[in-house]
Amino acid sequence: MAWVKPLFSAAEVNRAGDALKNPASSEKEFLAATEVLDNWRAIHSYPMHVFKIRLKNTALKVDSKALVVQRLKRVPAILKKLQRSYHGRPATMKLAQMQDIGGCRAVLSNANRVEKLAGEYYLRGDIRHKRVGYKNYINEPKRDGYRSIHLVYRFTSDKGKKEYNDLLVEIQLRSKLQHRWATAVETVDFFTRQAIKSNEGQEEWMEFFRLVSSAFARMENCPPVPDTPSDEKELYLKIKEKERELNVIKVMTGWTEAIGVFERKFKQSPELQFFLLELDIAGEKLNITQYTKKDEQKAIRDYAESENKNRGKKEYDVVLVGADTTNDLKKAYPNYFVDTQEFLTNLKKIVNKY
C-alpha cells in the first residue's frame, strides 16, 4: 500500500495553521493552507496504523472484549483547537505541534483494565517510540467530568519509514462507562449546537454532565469530579433534578427515534476497515461510505473533499474512522449512530434510585 508522503516542512505547516486561524486570510490563502493541512493530516495515517496494531494486540491481552479504533482529527476540530485561547490569552497553538491529529482509542470493560493496559503495556512496557505526554484523567478527572487516560508518542522508525519520524500520535484508553459519558456529551453538542466538550456549553448541561460523571466514577470506585457531592444520595438527587429540568431522557430518546439508523443494513466483510460517516441533521440521515484496507488513501482523500464541500455547514458533520468490523464501529462511535441507549440505561438507574 502506498502511504501519503510528507510534502511540506514543519515551518510551512505552521504557516498554514496560522493562515487557517486568521479571519483576515483571503480565500486563496485559506485554500492553499487547506492543501497543506490535508497533506499534514494524511501523513499521520501510517504512524497511526502502527500504533493501532500495537494497541489492539495489547488491549486484547487485558480484555478479550476490548474495542479498538483509529481516527484522523476532523478539520473543524483542528481549526477550533488552533483558534482556542486560554484564560483570555491569545491562541498560541501551532499546527505542527498538535498532538492528536492521528489518534487511536481502546474501550475496555472497566477502569481497572484501563489502568492495567496503561501501566503494563505503555508506561512500563517495551515500546521504542518516545512518550512525550501522559494524562491520567481517571485518577484526576477534569473539572468538566472528562475521564480517560491519554498517552502521546513521537513516532520513531530506524527502517524504511523515516519520513514519518517525529509525527505525534495520541492514544486514548477508556472504560465503557467513561466512553458512554463522552459520547453522550458529543451527541448533545452536535444536536444542540453547543460546545460542552470545549467547556463552552450551556451551564445547565455542563453541570448535568459533571454530576453524571461523578456518579459513573462512583460505580467504578474511582475518584469523583471536583466540586460535586461526595454523598451518593445528594449526588443522585441533584442529577434527578437536572434531568427533570433539561428533560434529558425524553430529548435524547427523541434523537434516537428521529434518525432511524438502527434499520440500516451494513455490508459485512472482513475487508472493510474504513468508514466515512456523514451526519446530516437537517436531512435526518447518516450516510456511510465503506472502504477496504487497500483503499485507505482514497478514503482520506474523500474525507478531505467532503469536509471542504460542507465547510461552514453547522448541521453537517464528517468523520473518517477505522475499525475492524461494522459492529465495532457502532459500539465505538455511538454518537454518530445516535445510540444513546446505554448511557440512558445508566442514567435511569441513577434517577430511579432515590
Image (cartoon, helix red, strand yellow):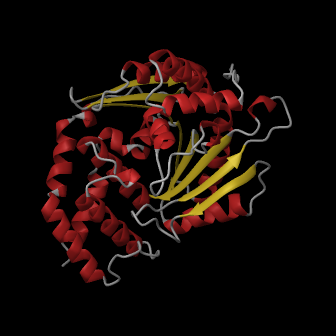
- Residue at 46 percent across and 62 percent down: it is 147
Quarter holding residue 92: top right
Quarter holding residue 309: top left
- Residue at 78 percent across and 41 percent down: it is 156
- Whether residue 314 is visible: yes
Give residue 125's position: percent from left, percent from top: 74, 59
Q: Residue furthest right?
A: 158
Give residue 306's position: percent from left, percent from top: 41, 21
Q: Residue furthest top?
A: 28
- Residue at 21 percent across and 26 percent down: it is 283
Q: Is residue 4 above or below residue 161?
A: above
Q: Is residue 292 above or below residue 178?
A: above
Q: Residue furthest bottom?
A: 231
- Whether residue 320 is visible: no
Quarter holding residue 231: bottom left
Give residue 81's position: percent from left, percent from top: 49, 43
Q: Is residue 176 above or below residue 313?
A: below
